Image (tube, grey):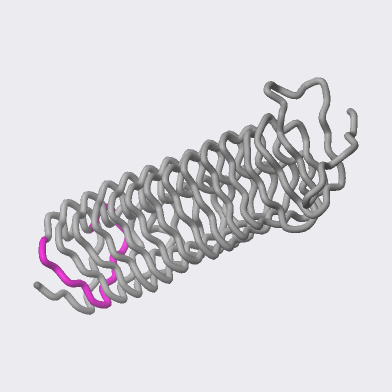
Amino acid sequence: MELIKDKEFGGERPLFGSHNLRLENVIIREGESAIKECTNIEAVECLFEGNYPFWHVHGFKIEACRFAPGGRSALWYSSNLKMSDTVIDAPKMFREMTDIETENVTMNDADEVFWRCKNVRIKNLIMHGGTYPFMFCDNVFVDGLASDSKYVFQYAKNVEIHNARITTKDAFWETENVTIYDSELNGEYLGWHSKNLRLVNCHITGEQPLCYARDLILENCTFGPDCDRAFEYTTLHADINGHITNIKNPITGRITADSIGSITIDENIKAPADCQITIREKIAVGTESE
């Protein structure tokens, strides 16, 4: 493997078509497409300031690097990436990629990142700011995520998440086959229009959670006091640990909780309108009309 160390490159395509190349303490200055159409690339302790550095790269490793704000749209149409201990200050990273592994990565401008990526494994990811991360992704495994980005995981499929703290709104909209374990989900309108969303040992806050969902499963989950109008037009099986403020017009299934503030069943409920709502071994009584 050829080694390039302590060098600077800039301009248009300085390392285009490189193969079997290791970069150590290299700076990619202003310019475009520095490492394009390449294979078997390693970058260690490098700084990327120019646009689009890794396009159409297959089989590469990025370790202890930094992508400055100018290094935007850096990782597109590529495959077989392992990234670790890296800080990303640029938006629109990870597009149309397959077979990605990241560990200990911080994204300080997580705008439109991880779009249409497949086969993604993530450990200890921090995401700040931006909109629509992980949109249209398929086959994603996450262990350790802290995110305040907006609209996370919309239209994603086949996702498993552990130990996450997500603060946002409209998270997990129109997802399919998503399971979330041991996580905190904060924000309005969680999981609307989802299919086969399963939450295990999760804490949920924010108004109108989990509406229009199909085949929703909750296991040992807790709700904050602001969770009103939950489960409207949803089919579900839910085991709630503790209190839930308000349940509104679930379509079918069952809900069990330790206590329920109120249940709204009105003329707008949809068939079959047979959801069984239970307060720990006794049928909940009383409804609230609107």
Q: Position of residue 265 (x, y in %)?
A: 82, 30
Is the C terminus in the top left, top right, bottom left or bottom right quadrant? top right
Q: Residue at x 81, y 42 (%)?
A: 283
Residue 7 in the image, given as x and y percentages of width and height: 22, 74
273 or 71: nearer the viewer: 273
Give left or right: position of 172 versus 86: right
Give the vertical position of 287 relative to 59 (above or below): above
Q: Percent x, y for residue 169?
A: 64, 46
Range of magenta residues: 19-34
Residue 74 occupies which quadrant of the picture?
bottom left
Q: Position of residue 258 (x, y in %)?
A: 79, 54
13 up-or-down from 87: above or below: above
Q: Horizontally, is 255 left or right of 76 in the view?
A: right
Q: Is residue 23 magenta?
A: yes
Query: Which picture quadrant has residue 136?
Result: top left
Say which of 231 and 191 sits in front.
231
Front position in the image: 215 or 65: 215
252 in relation to 271, above or below: below
Quadrant of the frame with the N terminus: bottom left
Q: In the rendered view, does 120 fall on the left or right side of 255?
A: left
Does the magenta portion include 21?
yes
Is residue 261 or residue 120 the one in the foreground?
Answer: 261
* Tally of numbered tags: 0
Which residue lies most toward the front here?
Answer: 281
Residue sitting at 68 percent across and 29 percent down?
A: 251
> Mostly what secondary structure, the magenta segment?
strand
Q: What's the residue at 22%, 63% (across, down)?
A: 60
